[in-house]
Amino acid sequence: MSRYLLKFALCLLLAGFSAGAAAQVRAWLDRNSIRAGETATLNVEVTGRVGGAPDYAPLSANFELVGTSVDTRIEPGAQGMVARSRYSAVLRPLRSGRMSVPPLQVAGQRTAPVDLYVEPTPAAVPDEAVATSDVFIDAAPDDSSPYVQQAVGWVVRLYAATPVLGGKIDQPVPDGASLTKVGDDLQYERTANGQRYTVVERRFLLVPERSGPLTMPAAVFEGRVGTTLIEQLTGSGGDARRAVSRARTLQVRPVPADAPQPWLPLRSLTLSYRSTPQQLRVGNSASLTIEASVDGAGLAQMPELQLPPIDGVQVFADPVQADETFVGGRPRVKLSRKFSLVPSREGEVRLDGLRLDWWDVNARAARSATLPPLSWTVGQGIGGTQAAPTNPAVAAARGAGAQGEAGANPAPASIDAAASGGGAGAVHKGWAIAAVLFALLWLGTLVWALQLRAQPRLAAAPALKAGAAPAGAAAPASLALNLPALRELIDRGDFDHIASVLRGLARPPAADDDELVERLADPAQRDAVQALRRARWGGGDGVDARNRLRAAFAQGPHWRQGAAPPPSPLPPLYPPGK
């Protein structure tokens, strides 16, 4: 009877917590705008589950699938170690214009569609490139005559018609300007002048600090390329290559005499209300959100978004949310900021529109971005008028509890109404659900304990099937329960990451590889780690190391038991039988 009761309780518990164990899926492109003849990489990330690759069949309508890859990592999470798999697909569009990457099925879920714009103009190889060279490098700005303190996109591209086996790209910093690397390197294919190249693109943010000529040093590539099939397959050997771009000189213009202050050189700037409250009540918080779309600057160049003062209304601002991108060879940023408005009196109130003055670097003229003014008639607070809070932290907390976005809730509810009405019902419902789950958990734990007490031998058998250590060794770490993720890591992960994860499985984590080998109880696992070390530092066989790791850690790591503490020279405080 107890066995059936145990199964029933465990089923209820799994049903109650299954929603939280679902895999999380997201998809994005490495670039949202490309030129005809180029490729884009679609990334699909699955968190919390290790399984098969996405179904790429829906892509065939508008894209050619050039190649796919997968990278699986095991990382610490809020509830222990979590598997995170990233599936990458290199896509070549079959047409130009605006198109959408369709949703893909993966891990029992569907990804969201992703937009892509393909410019119809094919990309051309730079004029300074040597036509007979299989590897060359080019560096160019998005503006060759910028203003002082203008954010300039500086892009370095390495072109390779043969596989690059290894190397480095170096872009020296010029005198009289700051140069900051932006994001990760991009890799894609480009067909130009009848030749197909693999392009590695590195992006920088260049900010001139003074007017006059600014000489950018040449970018340099030093590395090896594979000229034979054996070199390309093994990644060893190869011919040395060195490529140097030509140096460029930018003519930096000074700040114009009629430019608005503070000085803000941009290509475009638009302001908009993302949400506005429909109604204001005394003592009750309402939210207003402003959004700024900027072309030609990063977050560091932008002034703070701030509302003008409103007579009779306290304004509390949330931190600015920024989404920085690099499009068309230059930086762009989208800023949004939410404000909580708390009126202190009834009557008419007015918000003057926010205004930002900036300089149009294309038209070489002063511009202004403005928002229209807003006005409200402040009514009496629901549940009685209450004084506006004076502590910003208290006001922000009350505003967050009172109302969400105005577009989702046209008639904002007050804090008092939420606390006395539907909000209380939601809280009571949440406590009821929590009480049921805790009761089920208590029931399952009680039945499980009774089962273990009645049949201790049967309780030990499943642990060995789950990968526990044999007699004489400590149980494996919690990550051993996720054996498929560990196996995929050994099959596909790089050696440094595999060694790092294995060290982290120890409790406490091993400080280095020597300590990892010392703490493993299984001789085969110790030999496999030694093979991994030889493969990482040279002189070892990588294929043999993976085979050893795959076989030795098929059931998870087996750790040595801690040494028993030495007997105390003092007699026990409470002798047995006393």
Image (cartoon, rainbow, N blue to C red):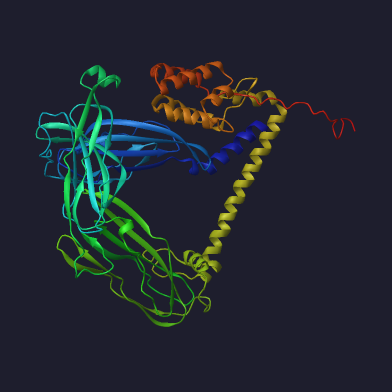
How far across and how far down the image is residue 398, in percent? 50, 67
The residue positioned 44% from the left and 82% from the top of the image is 346
Determine whether, in the image, residue 144 is placed left or right of residue 75: left
Q: Is residue 417 above or below residue 546?
A: below
Q: Quadrant of residue 347?
A: bottom left
The residue positioned 61% from the left and 38% from the top of the image is 9
Task: Please name whichever residue, 186 or 275, is drawn nearer the observer in this view of the structure.
Answer: 186
How far across and how far down the image is residue 434, in percent? 59, 50
How far across and how far down the image is residue 521, in percent? 59, 20
Query: Is residue 511 in view from this perspective?
Result: yes
Task: Please name whichever residue, 225 or 322, is drawn nearer the observer in this view of the structure.
Answer: 225
Q: Quadrant of the C terminus?
A: top right
Q: Quadrant of residue 410?
A: bottom left
Task: Please name whichever residue, 278 or 227, is drawn nearer the observer in this view of the structure.
Answer: 227
Query: Is residue 550 in view from this perspective?
Result: no
Q: Quadrant of residue 376?
A: bottom left
Q: Quadrant of the N terminus?
A: top right
The residue positioned 10% from the left and 39% from the top of the image is 127
Determine whether, in the image, residue 161 is placed left or right of residue 551: left
Q: Is residue 541 above or below residue 298?
A: above
How far across and how far down the image is residue 241, in percent? 21, 27
Q: Residue furthest bottom?
A: 347
Q: Is residue 377 above or below residue 367?
A: below
Label tally: 0
